[in-house]
């Protein structure tokens, strides 16, 4: 019986030539983080700057609970309103490292889209979903992706209808 010689396992000191880019930062002479490692307090003098003047706050501005105040400059083109605004206010009660912060913000964005469509309909404007979603271009350049998306949506809709349909007695 012939035994094959097992290769010796590579240790961290041996270079991994089988992985492209492995050990690229192993040379201490070519370490891009080197200047940042050995800094003194005097080196940080170049980072001092004056805080810009506070932008006037004329509408509700939501900010992280991890910040003691509002940033000097912020966006206020769409202040929180309606159900999406309530969801956003609830989300900002949690820290930015929590899913309870980010997932409600994603949900609030989707709710805001629906609220916008409702506002358009109230104003007598029927949204052109095909143009606004770029479906003409998608159909032209990614026809299989459009068909796949339609089939998935139809399947999900059918499954929801089957699950929600009242059960018939025999």
Image (cartoon, rainbow, N blue to C red):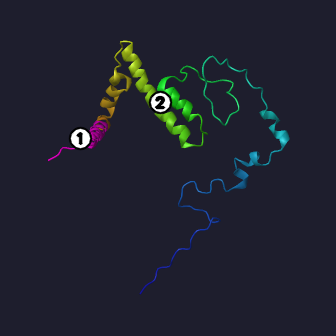
Which badge, 2 or 1, is on the more N-terminal residue? Answer: 2
Q: Is residue 111 left or right of residue 127?
A: right
- Does residue 121 belong to the magenta stretch? no
- Foreground pick, 15 / 118: 118
- Tell me the residue that label 2 is attached to: 109
User: Residue 65: percent from the left, percent from the top?
Assistant: 65, 35
Decide: marks 2, 1 in contact (CB < 8 A)?
A: no
Which residue lies most toward the left here? 170
For the point 73% across and 52% down, which residue is it? Answer: 29
- Please report the bounds of the magenta region as a residue range: 147-170
Quick one: SS at disc 1? loop
| Residue at screen point 30% across, 37% down | 153
Q: Residue at x 54, y 42 (%)?
A: 99
Circle on res. 166:
1
* Residue 72: quarter of image: top right
Q: Is residue 122 left or right of residue 143?
A: right
Where disc 2 sits, the SS reads helix
In space, the residues marked 2 and 1 are separated at their CA atoms by 32 Å
Residue 69, percent from left and from top: 70, 29
Front residue of this view, candidates 37 and 98:
98
The numbered mark at residue 121 is none
Tell me which secondary structure the magenta stretch mostly adopts. helix
């Amino acid at each position: 019986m012939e035994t094959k010689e097992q290769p010796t396992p590579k240790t961290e000191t041996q270079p991994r030539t089988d992985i492209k880019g492995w050990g690229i930062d192993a040379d201490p002479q070519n370490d891009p983080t080197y200047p940042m490692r050995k800094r003194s307090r005097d080196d940080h003098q170049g980072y001092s700057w004056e805080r810009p003047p506070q932008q006037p706050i004329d509408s509700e501005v939501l900010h992280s609970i991890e910040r003691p105040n509002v940033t000097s400059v912020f966006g206020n083109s769409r202040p929180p309103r309606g159900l999406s605004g309530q969801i956003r206010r609830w989300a900002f009660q949690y820290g930015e490292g929590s899913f309870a912060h980010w997932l409600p913000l994603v949900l609030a964005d989707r709710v805001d889209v629906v609220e916008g469509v409702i506002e358009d309909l109230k104003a007598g404007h029927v949204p052109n979903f095909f143009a606004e979603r770029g479906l003409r271009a998608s159909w032209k350049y990614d026809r299989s992706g459009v068909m796949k998306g339609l089939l998935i949506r139809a399947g999900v809709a059918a499954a929801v209808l089957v699950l929600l349909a009242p059960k018939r007695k025999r």
